[in-house]
Amino acid sequence: MKNVTIYLVALLLTTSCSKQNTSDDQADKWNGYSKYLKMGEVIHPLLAGRNINVGTVTYGIDNNANFYVTYDCSNSGWTMSESHMFAGDKKNMPLNKPGHPKTGLFPNSGFHNPRVSAFTYRVPLSLLPPAEEPGFVVASHCVVRSPSGQTETAWAEGDFTFTDKCWGWYDVFYYNQTENQYTILYGTTYSQDSLMLYHLNMTTGAVTLVLEEYVGNVSGVYDGTAYDADSSMFFFVNYNTGELFLNRMNDTMPSFSAGILNGTAASGTYYNGAFYYVNADVNTINMVTFTSSWQIASETQLDAIPGNITVNDIAMSPAGDYLYIIGEISGGGTELIEWSIAADTYYALALNMNDGSQIAFGSDGNLYAVAPLDEGGDSSSSYIIEVETGILTEVEEGQIIIIDDGFSDLSNGPVM
C-alpha cells in the first residue's frame, strides 16, 4: 500500500508540471500578441508602378498564433510572379546604405510559376520580437503582370517610406523602438554636367552616392542645399543663375524648378516652411516661402550680415531661434557665428577647421561639420561642433571622406 501511495503522488506531480508547461508554451506561442487578436485585419492597397492599384495586401493575426500577410490581385486580373515579405525588428530589415530595401534578401520570398492571383505568408508570432519591446515592422513587395502583359514591381502601401530616392513603403505593428538609430546628412558636389548627391551616415561614417542627375553641360556650381524631413523635399540652387531646384527624395521624379531667387545663394537651410539663404551679392539673410505647388511665393530680406563676415555655410537650429554661420571674420581663421533671430545679435567662436567647411544640424540635434583636410582637396573629415564652446569632436576617429570633388554644400537629412 505504501508503494501505491508513492506512485500516486509522483503521478500527480508529473501531471501538475505537464499542465504548467502547456500553459507556458501557450504564452510563448503568442509572444504577447494574444490581446491584439480581436483588433481585426489591416488592409492596404497594393500599388504597382507606384500608382496603379492592382489589389490589396491584408495583415492580421490568426487563431493559431501566426501573423499573416495575404496578397490578393484577383479582382484586377493582375497576377504575381514573385513575392517578398519582411516581418520583424526594423533594425534587421535588409537595406542598402541609403536605406532602400533589398527585397531579394527578405526572409519570406517566393517565385510563382505559374503566376498566382493570391498568396499568403504566415509567420509564427513566437519568431517575431515580443509585442511590447519592440513589436515589429512589415514590408510587402511583389512583381506583378497585367492581363495585357505589362510587368511592374508593386508594394503594399504603408504609413512609412524608405529613406532613399526609390519608392516603397513599410508599416508598423505595435512597434515602439526608438527612432533615429542613425543620423543622416546630405552632401552635394558638381562634376562636369551632373549634380552628385551623397548620403552621409554620421553615426557610422559611411558615405554613399545616392543620386546623380544631369543638370546641363554648363560651368559653375550648385549650392544652397537644404532638406525638409516632413515633405522629403531637397533644395539646391544654381549658383550662377539663382534658379532654385527641388527634388522630392522619396519618389522617382526628377528635380524641378521653383523659380529664381533675388540674389546669389552661397548657402541654404530650411525651417518651418521656409528656405533661408545668404545672398552673396549683398551679404544679407533672405527667407523664401512657397505656394502649395512648391513654387516661390515670396522672398524677404531678414537681416544684413556685418560686411567683415565672409559666409561659407549656414544652418538653422532645430528650434528655429538661432542661425549658425560658418565663415571668416576680416579674413581671419574659420569662425562659428551665431545670429540670434529674436535679439538680432551676433556671437562668434573660433574653430580649428580649414576654409571651405560645411555645416548642418542632424536629426539628433547636434551641429555637424564636414571639413576639407587640405583646402581645395578631395579628402574631408567630419565633426560634431559644440555650439557653446566651439569644441570639435571627430565623428569617426580616423574616418576620411574621399570623393572626386569636395562638397559644395551640406544639409540635414532623413530620420533613420
Image (spheres, rainbow, N blue to C red):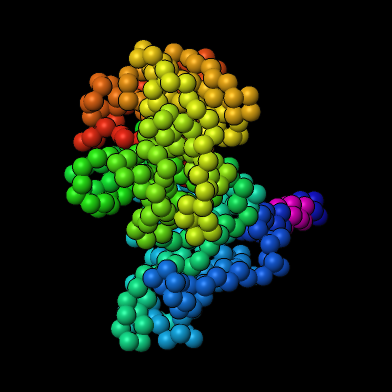
Residue nearer the viewer, 172 or 169: 169
* Magenta segment, prevailing SS (helix, strand or loop): helix
Task: Name the residue at 36% across, 48% down.
Answer: 243
The answer to if 206 sits in the magenta stretch is no
Q: Where is residue 192 in the image (x, y as percent from the top left)?
A: 18, 44
- The residue sitting at 39% across, 18% down in the picture is 328
Residue 66 against residue 300 in the figure, above or below: below
Q: Can residue 97 be seen in this view?
A: no
Side of 319 where 20 appears, left or right: right
Q: Give the range drawn in magenta.
A: 8-17
Task: Place residue 199 in its image quadrant.
Answer: top left
Establish if 1 lies above or below 344.
below
232 and 256: which is toward the camera: 256
Residue 36 percent location from the top left of the image = 68, 62
Pinpoint residue 257: horizontal percent, then vertical percent: 38, 55
The image quadrant that residue 42 belongs to is bottom right
Whether residue 253 is visible, yes or no, is yes
- What residue is rendered at 32% in x and 76% in y? 151
What residue is drawn where x is 42% and y is 48%? 234
Residue 9 belongs to magenta span:
yes
